């Protein structure tokens, strides 16, 4: 669905030698062009600075001693160079119910996000494969229906889904998806991720050459063999792109966590804890600054490490509802 | 440490159960009797995703639609919740704010993103400049909330300011201001956070589109002596119109559903609530699932036309291609 060609940079380098008029542009035009581009660059730098300063200020602050953070602005580090790692030690360490105890919540985030992403990818690609290559009646209509589900905001599902988990799927003391564990979050995230996963992966899997699949079929391979041996390896780029996207989306989620996690250090993700800290101790900047950085370090690492895939996933996900 | 091992075990069990379920499905699919084999295989691949979507999204959405017609005791009350929403002052403020959000965020994020994409196109250090503005995209709304609350932080006029914005006011000889408390302009300061996040998305998609403009067109315009502005107005904009619409509609949908920013920065107090936040507050905090459901339904109805418009446009583009 990507409506935008990704990297056409090479085609865009003007072919200077082939075009004689480009060899010696009139002096006047050259100067003018340089001027406008200089102004444009200046404007771009200003925007870049405005966009970066808030994060930068928070990062600097997270290394300043508590009294300094609360006493004066972070720009004072120019004259008063005192730095400490104490804030990080404080927010990470488990110490009583008053402490932020972020390490525990950090682990929760990982424990929620990894299975949540894996489940969505596996189930989504299985369905996507059948929508792309299966032969059955009503396939197109069913696919359009799944596609259309993207427009249902997850707010529409929250209240009944919580009831379903806590009441319907509970028989006596037995809970199919026990509260106090990650299970409810895994399932909820998987459900909410599936429409987009199926749609995007379908688009990719449908592009796999039919001959490859036909050849395997002629050799007597069933759907499961074709899926695991051919489709999954060939669809790896799409799986990676969507996987990263889903990973970040789950890591940054707050709403689903608030509804299904119960909020304790056993299950709740780091975003939820950070939101709590903002509410209850909004003035404890030494904790909030360090805590915010602990929570955004993983997405930032993913972002800078895998920016290519991230951008690709983003461009493909243009219609995410 | 014990705690972490326990959580790790939970994840391993979760993944193992999931793998076992998938394994059983594959086994059934492979061993299916010859007669109905194809049907069983198709069902095996589609059923897990479709069952989850039916149980977790379709059915709950229908139930929410019904819930919106009931009161807090589950009795049928007709359209009372909607009457509440469109007559009570506190609910009307929520609707007004959502309207302000949905006008300002797509407009400003797309314009700044487009301007930035044009400014840095083929500039030196383009990649780094891009990454700086794109980075907020990876940060959670909760993290962004902390970052910006720190920018907006307030101290009395006699103290040193720790928030950058108030310090700038003080440097300019003004009184420091409670940015997040004073209605109605506090909504604008929340909106700024969303713009900060979404501009990167707009920039990346539009930049890819700009790079896709055929060189010949750009060169032709340049040879005709078109100024930078004329080029932008008559070449760039018409060529990337499709991407522009996708960007605006995607940001619009995201803005309609914005929850985390409001939740973490003001919790919807001081007249800053929006529909998605109020939905959560009513359904899960105030014990008014009927009102929450009605708000969710209104959210759905607001998203619907945007998505339909977007889908139509995409289909038209596909036909042209």
Image (cartoon, coloured by chain):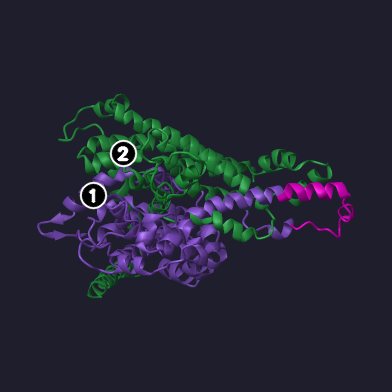
Q: Residues within 10 Å of mark 2 (few under 14, many from 20)?
A: few
Instruction: Tell me which chain the residue with mark 1 is part of.
Output: A
Q: Secondary structure at mark 2?
A: loop
Q: Secondary structure at mark 1?
A: helix
Most extreme residue toward the left, as rendered?
A172
- Magenta span covers which residues? A13-38
Q: In which image quadrant can residue B297 be found? A: top left
From the image, state the color of chain A: purple
A10 is higher (above) or lower (below) than B173: below
CB atoms at circles 1 and 2 under 8 Å apart?
no
Same subunit: marks 1 and 2: no
Q: Nearer the viewer, mark 1 or mark 2?
A: 2
Estimate the spatial distance between the alpha carbons at disc 1 and disc 2, rounded to whole Å: 26 Å
Front one among A63 and A246? A63
Instruction: Tell me which chain the residue with mark 2 is part of.
Output: B
Q: Which residue is mark 2?
A: B269
In the image, residue B254 lies in the stretch drawn in magenta: no
Q: Which mark is residue A162?
A: 1
Residue for point 23% across, 27% down: B78
Rendered location of residue B176, percent (x, y): 42, 41
Q: Residues within 10 Å of mark 1 (few under 14, many from 20)?
A: some
B310 is higher (above) or lower (below) than A293: above
Residue for point 49% across, 36% down: B104
In the image, residue A35 lies in the stretch drawn in magenta: yes
Query: Can the viewer see residue B249?
Result: yes
**Which chain corresponds to the colour green?**
B
Q: In which image quadrant can residue B143 be found? A: bottom left
Rendered location of residue B217, percent (x, y): 76, 46
Rendered location of residue A217, percent (x, y): 49, 68
């Amino acid at each position: 669905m990507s409506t935008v060609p990704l990297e056409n940079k090479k085609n865009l380098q003007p072919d200077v030698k082939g075009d004689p008029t480009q060899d010696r542009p009139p002096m006047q035009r050259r100067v003018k062009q340089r001027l406008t581009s200089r102004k444009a660059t200046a404007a771009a730098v200003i925007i870049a600075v405005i966009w970066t300063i808030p994060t930068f200020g928070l990062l600097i602050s997270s290394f300043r001693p508590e009294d300094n953070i609360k006493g004066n602005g972070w720009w004072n580090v120019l004259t008063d160079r005192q730095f400490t790692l104490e804030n990080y030690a404080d927010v990470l360490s488990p110490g009583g119910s008053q402490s932020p105890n972020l390490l525990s919540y950090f682990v929760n985030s990982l424990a929620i996000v990894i299975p949540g992403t894996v489940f969505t990818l596996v189930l989504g690609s299985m369905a996507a494969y059948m929508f792309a290559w299966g032969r059955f009646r009503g396939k197109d209509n069913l696919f359009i229906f799944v596609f259309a589900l993207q427009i249902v905001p997850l707010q529409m599902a929250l209240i009944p889904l919580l009831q379903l988990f806590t009441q319907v799927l509970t028989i006596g003391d037995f809970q199919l998806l026990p509260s106090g564990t990650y299970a409810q979050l895994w399932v909820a995230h998987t459900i909410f991720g599936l429409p987009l996963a199926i749609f995007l992966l379908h688009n990719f899997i449908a592009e796999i050459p039919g001959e490859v699949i036909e050849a395997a079929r002629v050799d007597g391979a069933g759907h499961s063999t074709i899926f695991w041996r051919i489709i999954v390896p060939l669809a790896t780029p799409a799986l990676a792109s969507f996987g990263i996207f889903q990973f970040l989306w789950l890591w940054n989620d707050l709403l689903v966590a608030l509804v299904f996690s119960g909020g304790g250090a056993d299950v709740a993700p780091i975003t939820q804890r950070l939101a709590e800290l903002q509410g209850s101790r909004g003035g404890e900047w030494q904790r909030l600054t360090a805590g915010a950085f602990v929570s955004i370090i993983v997405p930032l690492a993913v972002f800078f490490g895998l920016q290519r895939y991230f951008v690709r996933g983003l461009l493909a996900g243009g219609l995410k509802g | 440490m014990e705690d972490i091992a326990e959580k790790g075990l939970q994840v391993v069990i979760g993944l193992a159960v999931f793998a076992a379920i998938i394994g059983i499905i594959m086994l059934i699919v492979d061993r299916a009797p010859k007669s109905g084999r194809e049907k069983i295989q198709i069902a095996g691949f589609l059923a897990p995703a479709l069952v989850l979507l039916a149980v977790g999204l379709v059915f709950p959405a229908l139930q929410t639609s019904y819930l919106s017609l009931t009161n807090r005791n589950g009795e049928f009350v007709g359209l009372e919740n909607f009457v509440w929403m469109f007559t009570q002052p506190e609910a009307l403020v929520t609707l007004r704010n959502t309207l302000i959000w949905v006008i300002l965020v797509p407009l400003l994020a797309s314009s700044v993103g487009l301007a930035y994409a044009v400014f840095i196109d083929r500039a030196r250090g383009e990649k780094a400049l891009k990454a700086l503005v794109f980075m907020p995209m990876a940060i959670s709304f909760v993290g962004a909330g902390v970052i910006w609350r720190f920018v907006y932080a307030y101290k009395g006029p006699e103290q040193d300011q720790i928030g950058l914005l108030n310090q700038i006011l003080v440097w300019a000889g003004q009184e420091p201001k409670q940015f997040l408390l004073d209605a109605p302009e506090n909504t604008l300061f929340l909106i700024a956070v969303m713009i900060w996040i979404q501009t990167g998305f707009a920039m990346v998609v539009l930049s890819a589109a700009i790079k896709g403009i055929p060189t010949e067109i750009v060169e032709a315009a340049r040879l005709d002596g078109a100024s930078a502005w004329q080029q932008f107005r008559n070449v760039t904009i018409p060529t990337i119109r499709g991407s522009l619409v996708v960007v605006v509609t995607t940001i619009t949908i995201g803005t309609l559903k914005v929850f985390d920013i409001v939740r973490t920065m003001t919790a919807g107090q001081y007249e800053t609530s929006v529909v998605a936040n109020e939905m959560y507050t009513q359904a899960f905090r105030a014990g008014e699932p009927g009102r929450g459901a009605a708000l969710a339904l209104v959210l759905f109805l607001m998203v619907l036309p945007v998505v339909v418009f977007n889908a139509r446009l995409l289909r038209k583009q596909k036909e042209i291609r």
